Each structure stands twice: as C-alpha cells, then as structure tokens.
Image (cartoon, grey):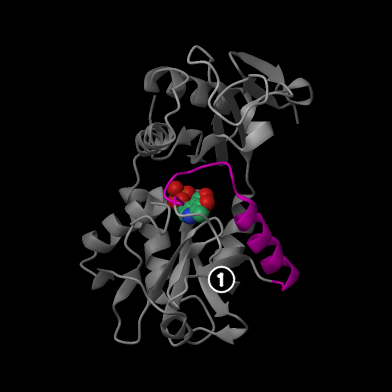
C-alpha cells in the first residue's frame, strides 16, 4: 500500500518522510498533536479537533503553523492521497527546528508539522466492541497539565505497555484520592449502580476528549441520567457498565477492570446504544 506523509509543506512518500535531528518534537517532546477519525473518507469532528489544537498551542505559547482552513486542506489531502476510507489522520506540530537549548528558540523559528493517515480495520474494531475489553488500573503519575494534548506521553506509554503485558486493552489512571482520572489514550466512563452515567469533569485532571464531548451530546439527546463527577475505583468495580471513549475507537465497552467482571461481564446496553448513535451526533466534514 503506497503511503504518503505531509512534512513541513511537502507530501512525501512514507519511507522518505523525515524530520530534522534538531526538531524540538524529537529532542524535547516539545509539541502537540491531534488524532481525528476518518469515516467513509470524511473527517469526523474536524472543527473541534482544530479548536483543541489551537488551545494546546496557545497553552504552550507555540505559534500555529498555518490557518485552520489551510490545516483542514492538508488533513483532507493527506486522507485522500492515502485513500483512507475508515481510519485516522494524525497531526503533530512541534516548536520547530533549532540548535538544542531547553528555552524557546528565536521567535522567527517556524513550527514544524507532520500529518499522516492510515486505514483501521473496521470489522476488527466492531468485533472488539461487541466482545468488550479489559482494563487495568495504575497510579496517575503524570504532570499537572494533561488537559494539553502534548506529545510528551511517557507515563501513558508505560501504562499502555503495562496493560498489554497483563492482557488488557487499556490502563486507567487513578489519582491519589482513589478517583479514576482517564485512560492512557481515552476517557473513562461508568454507569453506576443507581443507573447514573458518570465521567470526570474536564478540569485539568484529564484531556477534554472530543469523543467525550460527542458522547455527552448523545447522552443529553437520549435524556439519560448523567453527572460529570469523579468516580472512585471502588465505584468502577461495582458499576453496572464501564466504557471508554476516544476518536479512534469512539465508544468501547469495558467488561473487566483489574480482572474483575463489570456488571454481567459483557458490553452493557448504554455503552452499546451510545456507540450505535455516536455518528448521529458527531460533525462530519463534507468538503
Ligand atoms: N485522554 C487521553 C490521555 C488521550 O490520549 C485521548 C486520545 O488520544 C483521549 C483522552 C480521548 O480524546 P479524543 O476523544 O479527543 O480522542
């Protein structure tokens, strides 16, 4: 399969797509990113992803590499050139290329940008959602600004690897007070014993997931009982249902946490309905 990556103004064959050794993303993880779902060749929630990108850039005092309209063109062009029908498009912006020095480079340093796109196996994803997945939990040892979608992901990487080594799909972080924060690359939800849907408020303890925002709209549309409040690991163990959300997998039911079956140990009706109706509420770019 012929793949193409956009790198700093050029579409390059995947094998030849390179960044500079002094790119601050490579040297310092000094950058931000977005992952947007592609469905039937169209970008899902592009506007919200670009708005969050801008927020991340602003939070780190980084310049935007181009206007949102230009970024949208690059995203769509990368999707089209890679012939992605169902999958993801990845966008990364770093603070640019400059001689290695921790402090910011000169103000005229241009941000560096990379965009890639790839197909995901839709039927495999559907099978996974139909069966539900396992999650393990770990202490949340990340920095205080996880609301910024930064490419500095070491704790997330270690957590995901720990999950994989225990045969689980995802790791949920738990804060010092025993409350679940979020997954290593997803937001965490439960349906509590009284039937209330719970997810942590998007304060600085989590990333404000775009799929999370869409699911909140689905929840409101269905008139479901919900509360944005932190829930404890104990509540999660006793939950009727659990699931996670992310742009790449929308709503994924969780059937085991730390080896304990959740509810009846199979995907629950609420998670299944939210997954089913997700795209009725997401924004699809038709251009
Ligand atoms: N939380 C973390 C730490 C993530 O890395 C992600 C996605 O990568 C999410 C939440 C979900 O965000 P979104 O729904 O925008 O994909």
Mark 1: secondary structure = strand
**What quarter of the picture does the C terminus occupy?**
top left
- State the image quarter where residue 276 is shown: bottom left
Q: For the view shown, which residue lies furthest in the right direction?
A: 15
Position of residue 11 measured from the top left corner of the image (x, y, whole percent): 64, 16
Q: Residue at x 46, y 34 (%)?
A: 42
Q: Is residue 128 visible?
A: yes
Dot 1 surroundings within 10 Å: few (below 14), some, or many (20 or more)?
some
In this orientation, which residue lies closer to the viewer: 153 or 74?
Answer: 153
Q: Is residue 83 visible?
A: no
Residue 4 is inside the magenta segment:
no
Magenta region, residue range: 145-167
**What quarter of the picture does the N terminus occupy?**
top right
Position of residue 231 measured from the top left corner of the image (x, y, whole percent): 37, 76
Q: Residue at x 52, y 36 (%)?
A: 32
In this orientation, which residue lies closer to the viewer: 29 or 105?
Answer: 105
Q: Is residue 107 above or below residue 126?
A: above
- State the image quarter where residue 196 is shown: bottom left
Q: Is residue 218 left or right of residue 1?
A: left
Q: Residue at x 62, y 83 (%)?
A: 259
Q: Is residue 13 above or below residue 269?
A: above
Q: Is residue 207 above or below residue 8?
A: below
Q: Is residue 222 above or below residue 44?
A: below
Position of residue 205 measured from the top left corner of the image (x, y, whole percent): 41, 59
Q: Which residue is mark 1?
A: 139
Disc 1 C-beta below 8 A from ligand 1: no
Position of residue 19 measured from the top left corner of the image (x, y, whole percent): 70, 23
Q: How many marks?
A: 1
């Amino acid at each position: 399969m012929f793949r193409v990556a956009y790198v700093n103004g050029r579409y390059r064959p995947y094998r030849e797509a390179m960044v500079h050794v002094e790119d601050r993303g490579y040297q310092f993880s000094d950058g931000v990113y977005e992952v947007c779902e592609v469905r039937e060749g169209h970008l899902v929630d592009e506007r919200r992803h670009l708005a969050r990108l801008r927020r991340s850039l602003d939070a780190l005092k980084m310049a935007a590499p181009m206007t949102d309209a230009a970024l949208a063109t690059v995203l769509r062009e990368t999707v089209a050139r890679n012939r992605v029908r169902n999958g993801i498009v990845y966008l990364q912006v770093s603070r640019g290329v400059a001689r290695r020095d921790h402090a910011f480079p000169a103000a005229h340093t241009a941000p560096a940008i990379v965009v890639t796109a790839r197909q995901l196996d839709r039927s495999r994803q559907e099978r996974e959602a139909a069966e539900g997945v396992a999650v393990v939990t770990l202490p949340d040892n990340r920095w205080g600004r996880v609301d910024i979608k930064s490419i500095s992901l070491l704790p997330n990487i270690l957590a995901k690897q720990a999950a994989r080594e225990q045969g689980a799909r995802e790791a949920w972080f738990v804060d010092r007070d025993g409350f679940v924060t979020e997954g290593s690359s997803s937001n965490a939800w439960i349906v509590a014993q009284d039937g209330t849907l719970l997810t942590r408020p998007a304060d600085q303890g989590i990333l404000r997931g775009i799929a999370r925002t869409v699911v909140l709209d689905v929840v409101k549309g269905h008139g479901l009982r919900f509360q944005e409040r932190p829930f404890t690991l104990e509540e999660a163990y006793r939950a009727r249902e659990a699931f996670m959300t992310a742009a790449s997998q929308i709503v994924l039911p969780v059937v085991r946490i730390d080896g304990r079956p959740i509810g009846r140990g199979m995907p629950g009706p609420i998670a299944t309905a939210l997954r089913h109706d997700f795209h009725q509420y997401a924004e699809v770019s038709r251009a």
